[in-house]
């Protein structure tokens, strides 16, 4: 039986090779290819540990499933495509003035912030109209994950 650190390393390798901010279910399904006996609970525990130590970021979007990605920088922004549901890390510098403004105007002590931009990604806008782009969002989400 593999030790927990082997799952950790496998999850990190999986996320490095697939920078799509996948769901727990996607990670579990992919991980089972190499570790057929790994449980969903083990994947959840491992992800929680990696988030707690700052290795991964968790993107909780309302009541839908959380998505996970490697933390290249503690503060970074995301773009979420409303058509294909891919999540991209944005290569722009975080606006630290936002934290200072919020702190100055509210008196709250800001430790970090996140920001997501929503729209249609370049692949969806540049790609030809196809049957794939006309699928309902749930089917597209499963296809891209």
Image (spheres, rainbow, N blue to C red):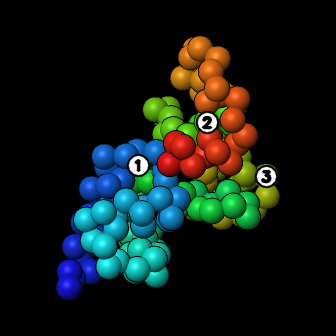
Q: Which residue is painted at 46% across and 81% down in the image? A: 41
Lower sequence index among marks 3 and 1:
1
Q: Position of residue 53 (x, y in %)?
A: 38, 71
Q: Position of residue 128 (x, y in %)?
A: 59, 14
Disc 2/disc 1 C-alpha distance (Å): 25 Å
Question: Which residue is farthest front?
Answer: 131
Query: For this view, does 42 lie left or right of residue 133?
Result: left
Could you say whether the residue bearing mark 2 is in a helix, strand or loop? loop
Q: Which residue is mark 3?
A: 105
Residue mark closest to the camera, 2 vs 3: 2
Lower sequence index among marks 2 and 1:
1
Task: Specify few, some or many for label 1: CA neighbours under 10 Å numbering under 14, 14-19, or 20 or more.
Answer: few
Query: For this view, does 12 lie left or right of residue 113?
Result: left
Residue mark closest to the camera, 3 vs 1: 1
Q: Which residue is painted at 79% across and 52% down in the image? A: 105
Q: Position of residue 83 (x, y in %)?
A: 67, 34
């Amino acid at each position: 039986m593999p030790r927990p650190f082997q799952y950790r390393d496998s999850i990190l390798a999986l996320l490095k090779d697939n920078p799509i901010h996948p769901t727990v279910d996607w990670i579990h399904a992919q991980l089972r290819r190499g570790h057929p006996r790994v449980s969903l609970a083990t994947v959840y525990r491992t992800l929680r540990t990696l988030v707690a130590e700052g290795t991964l970021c968790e993107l909780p979007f309302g009541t839908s499933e959380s998505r996970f990605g490697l933390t290249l920088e503690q503060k970074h922004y995301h773009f979420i495509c409303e058509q294909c549901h891919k999540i991209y890390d944005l290569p722009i510098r975080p606006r630290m003035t936002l934290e200072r403004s919020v702190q100055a105007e509210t008196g709250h002590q800001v430790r970090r912030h996140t920001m997501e931009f929503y729209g249609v990604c370049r692949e969806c806008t540049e790609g030809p109209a196809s049957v794939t782009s006309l699928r309902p969002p749930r089917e597209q989400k499963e296809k891209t994950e």
